[in-house]
Amino acid sequence: MKPLRVALLGCGVVGTEVVRLLNEQAADLAARVGTPLELVGIAVRRPDRVREGVDRALLTTDAEALVTRDDVDIVIEVIGGIEPARSLILAAMKTGKSVITANKALLAEDGATLFAAAREYSVDLYYEASVAGAIPLLRPLRESLVGDHVHRVLGIVNGTTNYILDQMDTQGAGFNEALEEAQALGYAEADPTADVEGFDAAAKAAILAQLAFHTPVTAADVHREGITEVTSADVAGAKEMDSVVKLLAICERVPEENGRNGRGVSVRVYPAMIPRSHPLASVREAYNAVFVEAESAGSLMFYGAGAGGAPTASAVLGDLVAVARNVVAGTTGPVEVTYAELPVLPMGETTTRYYIQLDVADQPGVLAGVAEEFARHGVSIKAVRQEGMGEDAQLVVVTHRAPDAALSATVEGLRAFPMVRQVASVMRVEGDE
Ligand SMILES: NC(=O)C1=CN([C@@H]2O[C@H](COP(=O)(O)OP(=O)(O)OC[C@H]3O[C@@H](n4cnc5c(N)ncnc54)[C@H](O)[C@@H]3O)[C@@H](O)[C@H]2O)C=CC1
Ligand SMILES: N[C@@H](CC=O)C(=O)O
Ligand code: NA
């Protein structure tokens, strides 16, 4: 059979590893696909940059010409960002090429346009690398679990922030120092704001929710809080609670009285305290882990390298073999279906639990006053601990579940409460119910 010709867009952290694997595993890949895969062009911005193991003769700065070449069968996009990635993917599909991408930002912002184009031009769009790097997660959701009814997807899906929080927790490292290490290790996005402000995890949460609940979800629908506001007081407070702070992505059906679809879905990303005994607490460095809870399957856990060049390239190559096999067979893989049309509910309606640490005046009546503020908003207290005396008195309150709007209104009330000197730490609590 004649070889399948592959074009690569972008040759940075992930792209370089894709080239290495294509070269090193050429014979095995050919045997698995049934025909050789031939890399025929690599679009780059800076052709003069030294890239070990990359044949300079393949480099071009004209990405558009490359994706529309007649002799290209499959396009891999690892440039990142919205434009020109979107236009290049659409141009490739329009000229009959299947596409593999690792670009969660684009999929979460405008996946609908890309999926519609894939359908219109009868080509594949595969994107396993876009969520949780090497971990096979999207294919299990898209294929293995498509006959089940998913209730919840919960996990750590950003390696950079997990690396930073882990370094802060275990090494007492500073935020900036840990971020620089994560960048040097190839985990961070080109603009690390995407990681630390939670945009990357929110994009991944949108992709996961859409697949899990067969309902349209974009990044704009996701409630997002990053880790830049996490202080050493939060990390120390978590330690005292025998807990750890993790940036979590949570996608869940919100139950309704009658009916099994739920009255909507909640999709959110925020730092939260989880007990050290919880499996997610032991996810270290840039590793990711995701729980999927489905009606018949029960609880499944996916764990592995969520970031880095080689792990991400592994997922890209897995998609490449799958897509190439489809091309050889003259078929395409499964298409996305978002028939359920469930609304994404506002964060305020989601029930969560809070950990609140207050510096208070150690005076008679302070505890009663604080408790009254919680009661006023209908928030029930699970545990209270008072420490210290006089000027240094501290109150730690952990709540039961309540609507997030009621919890944040309680915190605002406490900030204005005369005997509360400072709300020292506020963190949502997950994972020990
Ligand atoms: N690094 C990681 O751990 C992971 C990255 N991803 C995704 O993979 C994609 C690539 O990420 P990295 O390789 O880490 O980024 P990177 O910044 O190292 O590489 C991107 C490369 O694309 C090049 N580029 C930008 N615009 C271009 C254009 N118009 N034409 C040709 N080349 C262009 C840049 O010069 C750069 O070398 C992104 O979508 C990212 O979100 C996904 C999972 C993990
Ligand atoms: N920047 C991302 C890379 C993988 O998606 C991360 O840190 O997880
Ligand atoms: Na993955």
Image (spheres, rainbow, N blue to C red):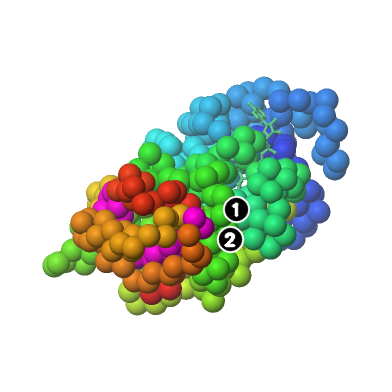
Q: Residue at x 72, y 38 (%)?
A: 12
Image height check: is 85 above or below 228? above
Q: Residue at x 34, y 47 (%)?
A: 418
Residue under numbered circle 1: 232
In the visual, does 244 lie left or right of 266? right
Taking the magenta stretch, the answer to whether it contains residue 274 is no
Q: Position of residue 175 (x, y in %)?
A: 65, 47
- What is the distance, in whole Å, between disc 1 and disc 2 at their CAs? 6 Å
Badge 1, how many Cα within 10 Å: few under 14, some, many 20+?
some
Residue named by callout 2: 236
Please name whichever residue, 3 or 75, is drawn nearer the observer in this view of the structure. Answer: 75
Q: Which quadrant would residue 34 be assigned to in this image?
A: bottom right
Ligand 1 in which quarter: top right
Q: Are marks 1 and 2 in contact (CB under 8 Å)?
A: yes
Q: Which residues are magenta?
A: 391-411
Q: What amino acid is found at the position of numbered circle 1 in the picture?
A: Ser
